[in-house]
Image (cartoon, grey):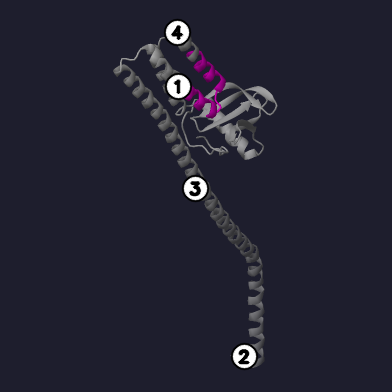
Amino acid sequence: MSSSSPRSMRTARVGLCLALLAGIAPLNAANDPLTERLIALRGEVEQLNSDLGLLREEQRSVLAGLNAQRAELAASVDRQGLLVREAQSKLAEAEGRAVEAGASGDSLTPLLLDAIAALSAQVSTGLPFKVEERLTELEGFRTQLQNGTLSASRGVNRLWAFFEDEFRLTRENSMHPQTIALGNERVLADVAKLGSMALYFRTQDGRLGQAQRAANGWSFVEATDKDTKLRIAAVFDALGKQIRSGYFELPLVAGGAQ
């Protein structure tokens, strides 16, 4: 057998290289879509990580705001409870002093009238929840004391019941029908009362808003932005389903309740 010449060996090597290149080219062409897909997926993952980071920051900001709002509401409830307890204590002390001194009904009546006036002032300046009805009831109580149809001794118990009702209102979350002044009109609306902290309304034609306090007193203001409307609607939905407690994101009431 004769040995191969150098020329034929070079020719064989070139042929082998061409064959290998011919085999690699289709392989690279087949891998190009996979590579592009992997690059696209990596970009999507990086974008999702970025979105997740932004979402986490947003949630942390929301939670911080809600915690601050909850603390403010809790502090305001405590203040309201303290005011009511102080009024009850003063009334009990006045009653005790009157009994110890052997005071007659005539001398006790002025104390009751003063307490009624103080409670009426608190109702007038507090959250505008059924203010007219509550003041009318207090006025009727005052009239009964003045004309003698209600004795002073019975009046003490009646006044105590008034204070207990007012204290209950500071803790109760409920929904009621109420006529409100909205702009230049008086309309019948559902009002959602959250203790003595916030009062939201929903009119029969679908307007939503809240009671806001300014320097000249309280007013009912219609909400205009979508997020605020959705939050108020969620409160009415929960109360309509008899959900009296829970954690809600609420619009802040301008001025706050005192």
Report which residue position mark 1 lands on. 114
Q: Is residue 90 above or below residue 227?
A: above
At label 2, counting other C-alpha atoms closer than 10 Å, the crowd grade (few under 14, some 14-19, many 20 or more) is: few
What residue is rendered at 58% in x and 54% in y? Answer: 51
Q: Earlier in the sequence, mark 3 or mark 1?
A: 3
Report which residue position mark 3 lands on. 64
Image depth: mark 3 or mark 4 in front: 4
Q: Report how far apart the C-alphas of labels 2 and 3 lie in the structure.
A: 86 Å
Question: Which residue type does callout 4 highlight?
Answer: Gly
Q: Which residues are magenta?
A: 115-141
Report which residue position mark 4 lands on. 148
Asked whether 133 falls inside the magenta stretch, the response is: yes
Q: Report how far apart the C-alphas of labels 1 and 2 lie in the structure.
A: 129 Å
Report which residue position mark 2 lands on. 4
Q: Report how far apart the C-alphas of labels 3 and 4 lie in the structure.
A: 56 Å
Asked whether 120 falls inside the magenta stretch, the response is: yes
